[in-house]
Image: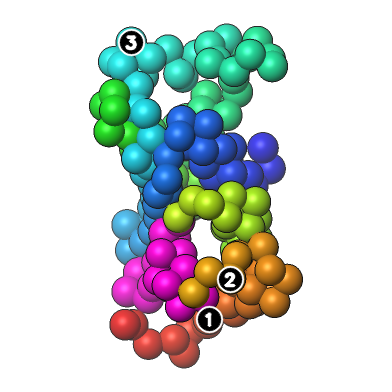
Amino acid sequence: MRELSLNVMDIVQNSVRAGASLITVQVAESKKHDTLTITITDNGCGMSAEQVKSVIDPFFTTRTTRKVGLGVPLFKMEAEMTGGSFQIDSEEGKGTKVTAVFRPSHVDMIPLGDIASVIHLLITCNPELDFVFTHSVDEKEISLDTRTLREQLEGVPFTEPAVSAWIREYLAEAEEELKSPELKSS
């Protein structure tokens, strides 16, 4: 994949298929430590130790619509190509946590891409699920928790055009502010 945000979409879709009702996506950038860490956590059905070992094999998938599963193996390869690391922690009946650490200064580092649009798409295409998104760059952080948003909307769905537009604009503006040197840490 050309952007890490597309890997995030693919891994989150695994969480959706695993029956998760809450999915957390954390992106943490540290210029000081030369790391970009992406962590995706869900409360889905989880995996056995055997499945965790198998999931990094591109010829293993639980899907019946195709015979290969490239999402996790590609994400792992992209992290390790930069000198980073990859880990999956999962427990049956409790959920899964995928952590990929990248070295942004490495020549093989691919861009994060449009993470705001990916998160917007995930929220609006899965309106029955809750998402917590955080993105930090050193001490600066932005976040969006759909549980809080859901309370404020009092039954208005995320797919309502005005709500969808607000989510998209909020995330895009927050990402821009995160890149801005003037933003003060919260």
The C terminus, quarter of image? bottom left
Instruction: Point out the frontmost of discs 1 and 3.
Output: 3
Q: What is the spatial separation of the Cα atoms under label 2 and label 1, in whole angstroms?
A: 27 Å
Q: Work out whether residue 133 can be spotted.
A: yes
Residue at 34% x, 40% y is 43
Residue 28 colored magenta? no
Bin the neighbour count of mark 1 within 10 Å (Cα to Cα): few under 14, some 14-19, many 20 and up: some
Instruction: Point out the frontmost of discs 2 and 3.
Output: 2
Identify the mark at residue 47; answer none if there is no mark. none
Residue at 60% x, 65% y is 157
Residue carrying label 3: 50
Q: Is residue 1 left or right of residue 119?
A: right
Q: Secondary structure at mark 2?
A: loop
Q: Is residue 157 left or right of residue 86?
A: right
Residue carrying label 2: 156
Instruction: Point out the frontmost of discs 2 and 1.
Output: 2
**Could you say which is closer to the camera, residue 84 or residue 123?**
123
Residue farthest along the front direction in this orientation: 155
- Residue 32 picture location, percent across and down: 33, 63
